[in-house]
Amino acid sequence: MSEPATEAEKETITTHELLERSARAALELQREDGSFPPGRNGVYGEPETPVRTTSHWLTTLSKVYDITGDEVFAEAANDAADYLLSDEARPYGYTFHSRNAEGKDKADGLIGQAAPLRALARANRIIERPELYETATSVFLAHPFSDRVGLWEKVEVNGNSLSFDRTVNHQITFAAASTDLCRDNQEIEQRINSFLTGLKTNLQIRSDGVIRHYVRPQIRDSFINLLEGFRHWQLLLNEIAFCYYTLTEEHRRKEVGYHPINLYGLARLKQCFPDHDLWDNQVIDQAVDYVHSSEYLSMFNNTSQKYGSMLPGIQTAYALFIFNDQDVDELQKWIIKDIQDKFDSGSNLFTSNAIDPHFQAATIYNITTLPDINVQI
């Protein structure tokens, strides 16, 4: 094991400079079709297509072009966008083909769609290609939404509806990724607003503030949805799973691991929907306060923590920036946690201590929502 860097060996740069360094390094990874090497869905080891990693890099490349004006990033962003618009990425004109795991949907639920929606919407504003916004809007609206339970359904790549995605972080991430679409579309804005209202029931926490892994709509609403389509039977099963998993320590570790992902998504939603009354809910305050607990802090030094966020410090920093208006010094501490543990200064990529290096490196896009502040590498 190498010795920790001394103060003299550390370099102070800004988060925007860090983004640029990683984006420039990523140019060497981009393939002829504009895509980037796919990940393996972290600890799950599932074969992914290049859709998610390419989407994450598109978000970063667009941001870095916006910061620097360097055309090399615009060209790379356009190439990545071209891949996401291709028939390979979206073979039937419905949802994106995100994974190839046997026995599972190729769309990878809502989480497999969130990254391309975010990337295309943000890139459209910077590289000014209206077809990016149009494609993202089409994919978003292809997902049925129930105002009764406040949840979206999964949709397979061929357009078949697969019932509700029961995982909390999938629903939150999908909604947060779609916020850039609602500026010019009232229907999308209405659905996200209704989703936030539904979270007052669907979002459950443990007594210490840890966000539960599964949604929990009202049982009567789940029964009504079952009458509307047998494919919704899993929503009733969810009640049993919710109670069972309360008792397992492994499931609690998973929930702790996904906590920064949930907070990051909720922070993005608050930033875009600041007046919604969900933010007055004590549950949100408890979930945010949990990041200061010893259990949460121990996650950063626990190599056995395999689930959830690959860059938890950066995601926590953004959550505290939005929810608590945290000062720069405090944000720096959280970001530097990830830099110390995950950043390889030789390659300028977040590939250190990675279960899934290609995917972890691509998640640097999380920095794009933070202010430009000084950090040490």
Image: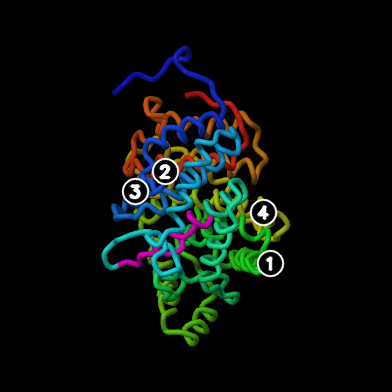
Q: Residue at x 53, y 59 (%)?
A: 172
Mark pair 4, 2: CA separation: 24 Å
User: Between marks 3 and 1, how big is the CA–CA gap?
Assistant: 34 Å
Q: Which residue is mark 3?
A: 39
Where disc 2 sits, the SS reads loop
Q: Please say if the residues under marks 3 and 2 sit with CB atoms less than 8 Å apart.
A: no
Identity, as a three-letter code, of the amino acid under mark 1: Gln
Does residue 222 sit above or below 302 in this rendering? Answer: below
Label 1 secondary element: helix
Residue contact at pointers 3 and 1, CB within 8 angstroms: no
As drawn, the residue found furthest toward the right would be 275
Category of crowding for the residue at label 4, using alpha-carbon neighbours closer than 10 angstroms: few (below 14), some (14–19), many (at least 20): some
Ranked by sequence position, the earlier of labels 3 and 1 is 3
Q: In x, y percent, where is residue 107?
A: 40, 64
Q: Is residue 114 magenta?
A: yes
Front-lying residue, 369 or 226: 369
Give the labeled residue for mark 2: 310
Q: Which mark is residue 186?
A: 1
